[in-house]
Image: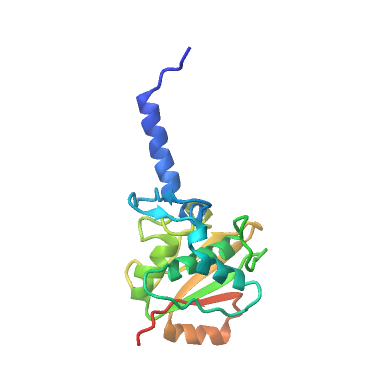
Amino acid sequence: MQARIDTEELLRLDAEKEIRERFNLFRYVYPDQDNIDFSGNANRILYARSKYLKHIDFFKAGLAHRQRLFCAGNRVGKSFAGLYELTCHITGLYPSWWEGKRFHRPVTVWVGGFNLKMMKDSVMAGLVGMKGAFGTGMLPKDLFASDPTSAPGVPGAIESVNAKHASGGISTYSLSHMIQALQLLQVLQLILSCLMKSLHY
């Protein structure tokens, strides 16, 4: 006997699926084959990893090189790739295809940019999502170890995020503007740092 389909149950399951996908972008990017992005961007396709050979080469280069530069044209995914790699490192979760550097313990990450306003609208939104929608960025909602710390002077901006690492520890991800960043580099022992900057010629 065929089970009767309960419409309410199907709607509930569909809503649950949408929420899980919306708060788990990290687990869906660089797939084996093209997929539709269900994280609220219904018209966006997450293209297969094979279409991002420069990104994959950039990740691989991390194994042999302590410093790397991803210099490319506008809107080709430089920041996206950087946020993906940062998320791998702060969570200790790496895909099976990963050939780059791996951190098997929690990390302290610093990301610097031109100013906190620019960082809020780009890097912060890309990593954690905007205020009120934390978890919709690259860092999955279930991997936040605590609520993000607010940054002084820029409404809605965050200063740091603590993330659960696969080892059982806690990684720290901090954002700062360039002047503050130069001061921090003199006193902090960082495991990983990243400059997210637009170059204008």
Q: Is residue 9 visible?
A: yes
Image point (63%, 60%), residue name: 169
Q: How many marks?
A: 0
In this rendering, would 187 be left or right of 42? right
Q: For residue 171, what is the image quadrant?
A: bottom right
Q: For the C terminus, which image quadrant?
A: bottom left
Task: Indicate the quadrant where residue 152 lies.
Answer: bottom left
Q: How is the image coloured?
A: rainbow
Residue 153 visible from this viewpoint: no
Please tell me whether residue 114 is drawn above or below residue 38 in the rendered image: below
Q: Residue at x 45, y 71 (%)?
A: 78
Foreground pick, 147 / 174: 174
In the foreground, 186 or 24: 24
Residue at far top of view = 1
Percent coordinates x, y for residue 182 in the rendering:
49, 87
Seen in the picture, residue 73 relative to 30 is either above or below; the reply is below
Near-viewer residue (53 or 6): 53
In the rendered view, does 93 fall on the left or right side of 10?
Answer: right
* Image position of 5 with respect to 55: above or below: above
Image point 63% across, 55% down: which residue? 96
Give how far across and how far down residue 199 sits, in percent: 39, 83
Percent from the top left, x then y, of residue 100? 62, 67
Q: Residue 193: image x %, image y %?
A: 54, 76
